Amino acid sequence: MLASFAFSKLLDSKLSRKKRGLISTTMLYVFLNAVWISAYFQHKKFQQIFGDVQNDNDKKLYSYKSTGGAYVWPCLIYAFFGMLDAMIQSLLMWLVGCIGVNNVILSRYVAFVKSTQSVGSGIAWALNAQKINGLVLFLITCVLHLLSMPSTLYLCFTFQDVEKDESECHTERDNRDVPNSPTHASFRESTS
C-alpha cells in the first residue's frame, strides 16, 4: 500500500504527463529488473541448498525458526514483489486514465485490461498445475514484461498535456456522442 501511495504521488505530480509517464515507467523497470535479478539468484541459491525438489513431500522447511537470518533476504524479495505489483497496477490504471477523458470509453479499456490480467492468471495457474518448472514460468513473465516496455514508453511519448484541470476531465460535452449517456439526445428522448 505504501508503494502504491508513493508511486501515485509521482504520477500525480505537477510535471507534464509525458515526463511523469517516462520517469515512472523507467523507475518501474529499473526496480522490476533489480528485484527479478535478486529473485533469480535467490532461486539458484535455493537450488544449491535444497536440490531439485520434485514433489511437495520432499520440501524442507525454510522459515525464520529453522534458518535464522538467512530467512530475511528471501522475505524482503517477497515483499518487493508485492511492491512491484502495486506499482504496476498504479501505473497501468494511470496510463489507461491518460488515454482519454470519456468515462464510458475508459471503463471499457479498464474492463479489457482486467480481463486480460485474469486470462493471464488462468494460464499461469494451468501451467503451474502441469508441474512446469517455476523458473520457466518466472522467465516467461520476465520476457513478457520486458517486451511490454517499448510500447509503454511509446505510449508515454505520445501523451500531451490537457489545458483544463485534470480533476475535471469528464464534462457533459464529452458525452454528447456516447449513446445511453444522460447528455446524449437519444437518452433524453427515451426518458421523456
Image (cartoon, rainbow, N blue to C red):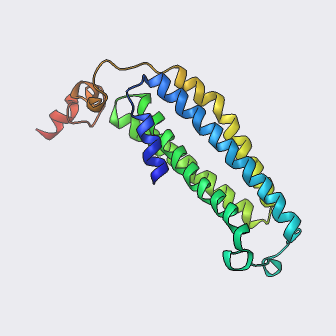
Q: Residue reaching furthest bottom?
A: 57
Q: Residue furthest left?
A: 192
Residue 162 image position (x, y, % from top left): 35, 20
Q: Residue at x 54, y 27 (%)?
A: 22
**Drawn side of residue 170 relative to residue 14, left or right:** left
Residue 190 left/right relative to 103: left
> As rendered, which of 61 and 155 lies closer to the eye?
61
Asked whether 56 or 11 is in front, the reply is: 11
Count of numbered labels shown in the rendering: 0
**Quadrant in the picture for residue 189:** top left
Q: Residue at x 45, y 44 (%)?
A: 6
64 vs 173, nearest the viewer: 64
> Which quarter of the figure has residue 108?
top left
Which image quarter: residue 43? bottom right
Q: Is residue 129 left or right of residue 82?
A: right
Q: Which residue occupies 82% across, 75% down? A: 55
Residue 61 placement (x, y as % from top left): 75, 78
Nearest to the observer: residue 22 or residue 119: 22
Q: Quadrant of the N terminus?
A: bottom left
Report x, y in % for residue 13. 39, 31
